[in-house]
Amino acid sequence: MGARHGRAVLIVTHARDDHVPLVAGALAARGADAVRFDTDGYPARARVGFAISRGIPEVRFSLPGRELRGDEVGAVLYRHRVLPDAPAGMDEEAAPLVRSELQGALDGALLALDATWVNHPHANRLARHKLLQLRLARAEGLRVPETTVSADPEEIRARFRGWGGRMVAKLAGGQLPLTADVEAYAIYTTRVEAGDLADDAALAACPAMYQEEIGKAHELRVTVVGDEVLACRIDSPGVEAARVDWRAAGRDAVPHSAVELDAALADRCRALTRRLGLRMAGLDLIVTPEGEPVFLELNAAGQWAWIEEATGLPIAAAIAGELLAGVHG
């Protein structure tokens, strides 16, 4: 049985995305019609089209085993879009234009849909900016770390001294390529030592984000889906390799447990997510030894399947509910 009104949920992602089966299963359990669009199969195995006939715009998707019109789509789960490649053997000078046109046709067809988005691509793009996140988090009453983004060696060293030598560094806003080897390119939050700040040329090569290192009792990964707030406690301080950035130790090395946030913190997490125009987000926070939460960053299309697996938090069901609210609305 399809979702009410016969409108489908379109899941835009790539073939390696292991989160999609969880959401698709939750949608199927509610009788919804979920259609997966792996954009790395475009245009060889999946095609998009757009036409205006007699004044009526129409989006079309030709997917493996399924033809879908845009007016049949009620909601879109936008996970990831992998950029299409130009056809093999094409002249090198023509390839950039072909690639740009493939991308433009794909994005244009998706954006022409009249549907509920989780999340809209424009909102995802805006939310990637960490400096904006920090400003809005502070505006919503969340504590954030003392921060500087700079390529000035003297300023960076002055901050290091002012923070008593407790400094970490991270990317200010760079986005890593979505490839099979993405883990090999991962740059984790790193503790800065005095010797790391001796090379002026290295510090001046490009800006980086430097923050005062905050003492932690544990960390939180908070997943906001619509009005639902699902929180996971990550006990990283007890694992040596995880003390600065728990991802460096690997997910299986660090204990995870479901927790309930106090109402004020949950409200602030919801408010920040909405300020960024998102229906879903994953927020990373530290809880200090004194019990104060400190906001670090937000991921609009972050990973969550491992949290559901480790804690049983019903994240996929919450996403399915948010999508179907859009379909039925």
Image (cartoon, helix red, strand yellow):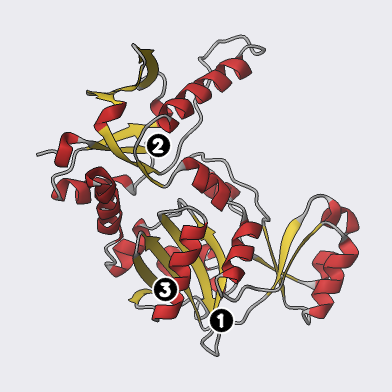
* Local crowd size for mark 2, using a 10 Å CA cut-off: few (<14), some (14–19), many (≥20): some
In this rendering, the answer to whether 189 lies above or below 42 is: below
Which residue is rendered at x = 68% and y = 56% of the image? 172
| Viewer-side label of 1, 3 | 3
Which residue is rendered at x = 82% and y = 79% of the image? 162
Q: Hey, which quadrant is residue 232 in on the image?
A: bottom left
How far apart in space, not on screen, are marks 1 and 3 (Cα)? Answer: 19 Å
* Local crowd size for mark 1, using a 10 Å CA cut-off: few (<14), some (14–19), many (≥20): many
Name the residue nearer the viewer: 30 or 154: 30
Identify the residue position indicated by label 1 in the image.
216
Q: Which mark is residue 266?
A: 3
* Local crowd size for mark 3, using a 10 Å CA cut-off: few (<14), some (14–19), many (≥20): some
Image quadrant holding the N terminus, namely top left
Identify the residue position indicated by label 2 in the image.
14
Q: Amino acid at mark 3?
A: Ala
| Mark 2, secondary structure of its residue | loop
Q: Amino acid at mark 1?
A: Lys
| Mark 3, secondary structure of its residue | helix
Q: Where residue 135 sits: x, y (%)?
A: 64, 64
Q: Hey, which quadrant is residue 302 in on the image?
A: bottom left
**Image-based side of 189 in relation to 206, left or right:** left
How far apart in space, not on screen, are marks 2 and 1 (Cα)? Answer: 36 Å
In this rendering, the answer to whether 123 lies above or below 146 is: above
Q: Amino acid at mark 2?
A: His
Looking at marks 3 and 2 on the same chain, the residue that comes earlier in the sequence is marked by: 2
Q: Which mark is residue 121?
A: none
Name the residue nearer the viewer: 149 or 49: 49
Looking at marks 1 and 3 on the same chain, the residue that comes earlier in the sequence is marked by: 1
Q: Where residue 197 sits: x, y (%)?
A: 84, 65
